[in-house]
Image: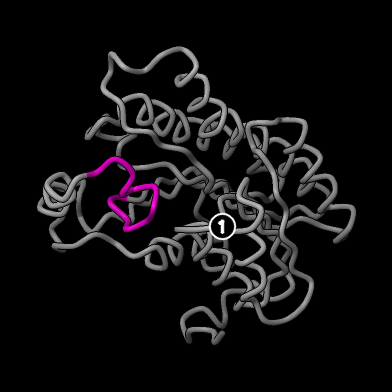
């Protein structure tokens, strides 16, 4: 694995980072970039085999794979505490894990609603809280919560309930940015558009994928690495004076 020139001087060398959703898509790409840039990465996902495969591709030492269900708040707290104790610090949290099942409004039952809220929104709240406490002693930290353009414009293609969770993440981010700012910790939101990931393609037909693509001024879906670079920027020294911000990586979708 080689470090891209633009990523080699981001101040990530030696940083300790937790990345959720690291078995595939944006989470995997972000974990790879962090590891290549010198960070020690704790890559987490409910997909144990997938996250182990992610870490197996890293160069260097000090990286770990953790199989975790982030809907389990006790497990989230334990992950942060275990990482901070083992590494002596926690510098970066990338909250990327999410679930999406495309359902019409009338098809979303209570169990599905709770699943979306627990994985997409509740987990980010409690991971932010635990990470913030672990970062405070060093008066430095970077938290990046991944939302979605759906949270800004409302649900589409059977993603209404999903969009609600993603809108909540944006307010969650601003609240934690205010609380943690005095401790030297920045908290920002990355808002991806249509990124070519397995989750994005879930439940999408050729026609709906083309409809999504046609709304993007750049004219194509984004690649996971393109979105991951934006997340890593927010986690780097280059974004030291950026907090409470929503950064859209969407090929211009919001302009439409």
Residue 35 in which image quadrant: bottom right
Q: Could you tell me how many numbered marks the image carries?
A: 1
Q: Name the dominant secondary structure of the magenta segment.
A: loop
Q: Position of residue 44 (x, y in %)?
A: 66, 52
Query: Could you tell whether 123 is left or right of 232 in the image?
Result: right
Colour scheme used in the picture?
one colour
Query: Could you tell whether 198 is left or right of 69 in the image?
Result: left
Q: In this view, does 176 lie above or below 245?
A: above
- Residue nearest the observer in this picture, 148 or 136: 148
Q: Is residue 80 above or below residue 163?
A: below
- Residue nearest the observer in this picture, 23 or 123: 23
Query: Could you tell whether 32 is left or right of 110 in the image?
Result: right
Say which residue appears at 57% left-offset and 57% top-offset.
Answer: 22
Q: Where is residue 80 in the image (x, y as percent from the top left)?
A: 77, 46
Residue 236 in which image quadrant: bottom right
Say which residue appears at 22% left-offset and 33% top-offset.
Answer: 156
Mark 1 neighbour density, 10 Å: few (under 14) some (14–19) many (20 or more): many
Q: Where is residue 68 in the image (x, y as percent from the top left)?
A: 69, 44
Q: Position of residue 240 (x, y in %)?
A: 56, 60
Is residue 199 within the magenta segment?
A: yes
Quadrant for the C terminus, please.
top left
Q: What element carries label 1?
A: loop
Query: Could you tell whether 234 is left or right of 80 in the image?
Result: left
Residue 87 in which image quadrant: bottom right
Write down the residue under mark 1.
23
Q: In this view, does 30 lie above or below 209?
A: below
Say which residue appears at 62% left-offset and 67% top-offset.
Answer: 53
Say which residue appears at 70% left-offset and 49% top-offset.
Answer: 67
Q: Give the range drawn in magenta.
A: 193-204
Is residue 17 within the magenta segment?
A: no
Quadrant for the N terminus, please.
bottom right
């Amino acid at each position: 694995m080689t470090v891209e020139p633009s990523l080699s001087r981001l101040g990530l060398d030696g940083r300790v980072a937790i990345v959720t959703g690291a078995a595939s898509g944006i989470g995997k790409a972000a974990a790879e970039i962090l590891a290549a840039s010198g960070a020690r990465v704790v890559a987490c996902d409910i997909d144990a085999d997938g996250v182990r495969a992610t870490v197996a591709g890293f160069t260097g030492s000090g990286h770990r794979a953790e199989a975790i269900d982030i809907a389990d708040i006790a497990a989230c707290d334990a992950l942060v505490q275990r990482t901070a104790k083992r590494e002596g610090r926690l510098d970066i949290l990338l909250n990327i894990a999410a679930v999406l099942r495309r359902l019409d409004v009338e098809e979303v039952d209570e169990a599905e609603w709770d699943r979306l809220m627990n994985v997409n929104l509740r987990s980010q709240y409690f991971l932010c809280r635990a990470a913030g406490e672990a970062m405070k002693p060093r008066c430095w930290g970077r938290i990046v919560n991944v939302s979605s353009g759906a949270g800004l414009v409302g649900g589409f293609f059977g993603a209404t309930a999903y969009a609600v969770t993603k809108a909540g993440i944006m307010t969650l981010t601003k609240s934690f940015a205010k609380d943690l700012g005095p401790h030297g910790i920045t908290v920002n939101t990355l808002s991806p558009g249509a990124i070519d990931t397995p989750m994005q393609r879930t439940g999408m037909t050729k026609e709906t994928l083309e409809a999504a693509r046609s709304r993007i001024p750049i004219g194509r879906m984004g690649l996971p690495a393109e979105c991951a670079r934006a997340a890593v920027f927010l986690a780097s020294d280059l974004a030291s004076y950026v907090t409470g911000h929503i950064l859209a990586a969407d090929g211009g979708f919001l302009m439409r």
